[in-house]
Amino acid sequence: MAEFLMPILGADMSAGTLIAWRKKPGDVVKRGDVIAEVETDKGLIDVEIFVSGVLEKIVVQPGQTVPTGTLLAIIREEGALETAAPPAPRPVAPPVAQPEARVVVPPVAPAPAGRVRISPLAKKLAAELGVDPSTVEGTGPGGAITGEDIERAAASARAAALAAPRAEFDREARMRQTIGAAMARSKREIPHFYLATTVDMDRAMRWLAEENLRRSVTDRLLYGVLLIKAAALALREVPELNAVWRGGQCLQSNAIHVGVAISLRQGGVVAPALHQADRQSLDDLMQNFRDLVQRARSGGLRSSELSDPTITVTSLGEQGVESVFGIIYPPQVAIVGFGKIVERPWSVEGRIVSRQVMTATLSADHRVTDGHRGGLFLAAVDRLLREPGRL
């Protein structure tokens, strides 16, 4: 048997609300199937299963909020299915004949279809207050709808309308609190160090402009995917930054899953993973990045996308920020920041020319690496962005 637990979808998550089950007891599940929907402060998340078998038992029902690590369901794994002995057949008693019983049901007069009993005064009031009488339960004689019933319905509708933005405000406030708590813990527990370099983006931007001229509007690339791909490839050269810190030790990852910081419309930020970012082409990265942004903002991220990132990339260039020094998102050990592209005087072979440049930064964990290795990482990012055709 395998236990399906409330997942930890980031260092700032302590609990989640089970919204719905996608499978029911007895259903066959495969590794990677989405079997539940969980709501966190960051939105609605599709939660995957990481074993194959049969959903044996559901422990937590929809609507319950439970801490991370709580048992949600029990899965009978594939191996157990093959080795389990079939249950012994139970003897079945022959059916006993029962005397036929006659039930007499008195006839019920059908209610007039579509007819609503409402007084003329209540009907006029409903029109003034915008209340649909068919949705109101009457308390008058014979179930007739009175003016008081209409006023109560209108008051309930107003209260519901006021509660919706309040609930959204409360959710954003909770998200800010949880993110703030996680970042405060990160600053307390992780010995950060910070590095920055200026990258000559002139060749990359000219290459991008020429490349996009050959493409349809829907297939064009954003320069952000160049930054993601360069960071992913640079991790091959400095692999200790592609890691997580768990149990007092650094665990280096063989796969490069780049978390991309995405701002949410309701406020806050989420950083889901682009899996195997170093192995994806720029076209695939662009397509997957668009899909990730859309699902992050509309709801529909998968649990693996929130739990798998091995490093985070954040870019505030579109907001006009020239440099950003991020706070490491546990259990990761580094975060890369990119600012906006600006024109600056630049020395090229002894001549001063105008160049498009950008500030790239690295915040890293001193328990895992040092300034020398961090400098090699930023140098690799710089070099890769100077050769955009090879990304």
Image (tube, rainbow, N blue to C red):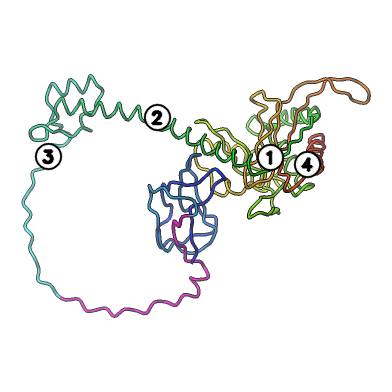
Q: Position of residue 169 (x, y in %)?
A: 44, 30
Query: What is the number of the mark on residue 374?
Result: 4
| Tag 3 residue | 111
Q: Position of residue 100 (x, y in %)?
A: 9, 68
Q: Amino acid at mark 3?
A: Ala
In the rendered view, does 61 fall on the left or right side of 13?
left
Assess whether mark 4 and mark 1 are in contact (beta carbons under 8 angstroms). Answer: no
Crowding at mark 4 (Cα within 10 Å: few <14, some 14-19, many 20+): many
Give the spatial CA distance, label 1 vs label 3: 67 Å
Considering only vertical position in the picture, is 233 above or below 264? Answer: below
Tag 2 or tag 4, which sits nearer the N-term?
A: 2
Residue at the extreme front: 188
Of the pair 170 and 58, the residue shown nearer to us? 170
Give the spatial CA distance, label 4 vs label 3: 78 Å
- Residue at 50% from the left image edge and 71% from the top image edge: 80
| Tag 2 residue | 166
Q: Amino acid at mark 4?
A: Gly
Tag 3 or tag 1, which sits nearer the N-term?
A: 3
